[in-house]
Amino acid sequence: MTKTKLHAASSSALLLQTSSAGYEFDENSNIWMLDGSISIKLSFLSELEVEERTSEGFRKSLSRFAQELSSGYCDSIINRAKKFFRVTGSKDFSAEALSSFRSKLDDEHLWELGALRSFLESWYEWQFSGITRKEIEYLDGLRIKGCVKGYAVLTNCPYSGAYTSLEHQSLLYGLANAYEEKRLSQHDYSFLLAVSMTGRRPVQIRYLRFGDLGFTDNKESCSYYLDIPRVKQQGGKTFRKEFKRVMICKDFFDALNDQRNDVISWVNRTLGDIDEGLKSSLPLFPTYNRLALCSSSDISSYHDKDFLHVTSRSINNIMFKLNSTVIAHSERTGDRLIIGCTRLRRTFATNLAEEGFGPMVIAEALDHSDTQQVGVYARSENEIAKVVDEVMAPVLAPLAMAFAGTLVESERDAVRGNDPHSRVKLNTDISVGNCGNNKFCADGWKSCYLCKRFQPWLYGPHQQALDELHKERRDQEDAGVSKKVISASDRVLLAITQVIQMCATRKAEFKTFEGEYRHE
């Protein structure tokens, strides 16, 4: 909807429009705030001395896009246009300038001209000034390949593709350890966990509110759910208009509920008591400095906007913090894992493919409206889970760094070493180390090798533990258990192998020291 006002101070006309996210912006201004995260700047049009007719047509066309399409898409058009004018030095979108731009793009970046083409074709269709039939005929004559989709997944790229099962486990253990040690806030921990557990886009997690998290309780069982807002759907304003319910486990529910309780405590301290009816409208992941300035009526007024939700820039900061805080390693490279939301989403889809699900199920799980983009996950190469075997384990163990505890020479050197109840037992007669945790734990000895509080003994029977695990896995294989299930113990296998290797190294050091001592 267009509103025209006369600015009292400057007597210049304000041409007010409303973005697809519900934000009002002045078409004649150089700054348009399109949603809670994205403000686009058009000052480059004058800075680069773009021809007046072209500048006017660009504004009007972009305004139409802003009213009908996502803010992120409009931001990408701005970036493509800036690059076009800077690379070509042109002051308009003439056919000659478009040809020059085409010649300066390599095959990998040719899609950028394709992105501009759809915008320019709409511009011409709306009959705004600056684009003629000549430019459209030139663009129609081009054969432009789109951006290559699925390359990172297809090539199993260790830096941008899906995480392997071991890498994903390493990441989740590292995340849990950082949270337990209070190096990560509840907010950051819950956000990444939500992306990992649901496979949804970060923007969908940003849009969550209190009322989206719930449970159903009956006499027989209790189930937990998360109503996730849909994005990238056809039509105009789509902010929290459609939802898909996802059933979640209790541990994940508890993490999100803890985050909700943290926000409630902050609101009560900062804003005082607010109406119970408003609480369901509070963002699960808020922008606190904006929320701090709100009254109850203000919160109500933002019901159809994302203004109080955490911004995309803040999410980028969270990811930077996670990459510097969470300690997790790749068994493929031996390096620290690069943590990214896109990689987690690719991992979520790849895991579904490995479990045998087809394109329809994967598309539904990723919240796609069709199966066009999910074929890459359903390729046969991705359908067989890789299982770490006895030959691979010694090679991968030092790279994966699955063991998180502390090797001790004997029980007397261990935390709680004087407490017989702290012993980690393979069976009633054989122990392999001590637990340094005073809390009750019923996870079993295999999980201990992955725990940072585990203190394996230097002369403990770790080879026996490894042999027992190998036997268990062979029994599973003989029973026809899927490779996906068997591979769930890969990380434990690598952790035990790493402990055995560490013990061998330490013992060799002792022998060397003893030899030198005798020689002296």
Image (cartoon, helix red, strand yellow):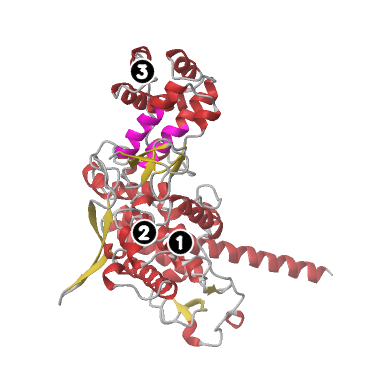
Q: Nearer the viewer, residue 289 or 345?
A: 289
Extent of the magenta region: 58-79
The residue indicated by pointer 2 is: 194
Name which of mark 3 and mark 2 comes first in the sequence.
3
The residue indicated by pointer 1 is: 188
Give me the residue at 53% from left, 53% from top: 320
The residue indicated by pointer 3 is: 143
Is residue 440 covered in magenta? Answer: no
Name which of mark 1 and mark 3 comes first in the sequence.
3
Q: Secondary structure at mark 2?
A: helix
Residue 264 position (above or below residue 229): below
- What's the residue type where badge 3 is placed? Arg
Would residue 515 be found to the left or right of residue 24 on screen? right
State whether residue 342 appears in this view: yes
Where is the C terminus found, in terms of image quarters?
A: bottom right
- What's the residue type where badge 2 is placed? Ala
- Measured in 3D between alpha carbons, the distance from the residue under mark 2 to the one under mark 1, in whole angstroms, is 10 Å
Taking the view exactly as shown, the residue that stands out farthest to the left is: 219
Q: Secondary structure at mark 1?
A: helix
Residue 202: x %, y % from top left = 38, 51
Q: Say which quarter of the image contains residue 406.
A: bottom right
State whether residue 450 appears in this view: no
Would residue 269 be found to the left or right of residue 235 on screen? right
Badge count: 3
Q: Nearer the viewer, residue 20 or 349?
A: 20
Q: Say which quarter of the image contains residue 57.
A: top left
Residue 380: x %, y % from top left = 30, 39
